[in-house]
Amino acid sequence: MTDHAGMINQSVPFGVRRARLRLGMTQMQLAEFSGVDIGMVYRWELGLACPSHEIWARLRNITLKASSFLDEDLVRASPLYKFIVDIEDLTSPIVASKGIIEAIRAAGASEEEDLPGDIAEIGRKSPHYAISGVRALEIIQADPRWRSGEIVYAEAHCLAPVLGGVWVDGMLAPLPERIAALLEFAPSRHGPGGGFWVHPVGLDDMPFNHPQ
């Protein structure tokens, strides 16, 4: 999993993150699943450490064998806040998790029990649009690296008008074989602290491309 210079293979952070999202797990849950502490999972996803050969084989097998149907099934059943979105229009949800549908209904933004229909419009019409999740997704969509497939994942800290105006931490990962992307987010422990930000991470940004 390392090259001749000892740098971590670029597929490791992407593979670990993809496997975790496909399993519908938090970093803590993946740590328990893999028999390591959460700090190690964090280091894997940053490209600072490699899983053991046994763990990597299990995670890679999940990533390679999970079908599109399984992706949708896992997302729909997840209690976490998740969407599968159109890779060409990140504000257009294709599949929504049980967790996000319940949260949206609880906030009174939608009564739909399957796929909420006007999430993007709620964000665009909000007086807080400039710091909203919809705006964050539009920024990622406009990044030339997203259009060219160079972004490994993107993170954001933003407001979610559809959830009643709570601040959330979000992560977006492409699913190129589906021409889609997986969006996962959760209420932020920091609230508005740090303000609105969007951080797309490309291959050139990963630590293994910048040896000390």
Image (cartoon, rainbow, N blue to C red):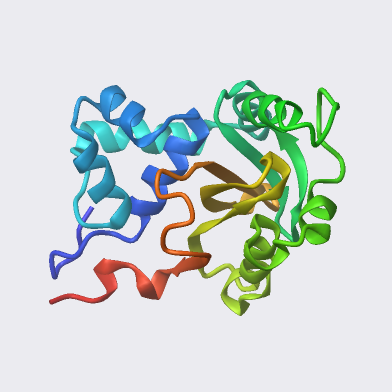
Residue 43 as seen in the image, left or right of residue 172: left
Residue at 68% across, 64% down? 135
Give the image location of residue 23, x and y in percent. 48, 29
Is 97 situated above or below 121? above
Is 34 situated above or below 174? above
Given residues 45 and 155, the one toward you in this image is 155
Residue at 61% across, 67% down? 140
Residue at 68% across, 47% down? 178
Give the image location of residue 205, x and y in percent. 36, 73
Give the image location of residue 134, x and y in percent. 70, 58
For the C terminus, the quadrant is bottom left
Given residues 207 and 57, the one toward you in this image is 207
Report which quarter residue 137 is drawn in: bottom right
Residue at 26% across, 32% down? 55
Give the image location of residue 41, x and y in percent. 27, 41
Given residues 4 and 29, the one toward you in this image is 29
Tally the marks.
Answer: 0
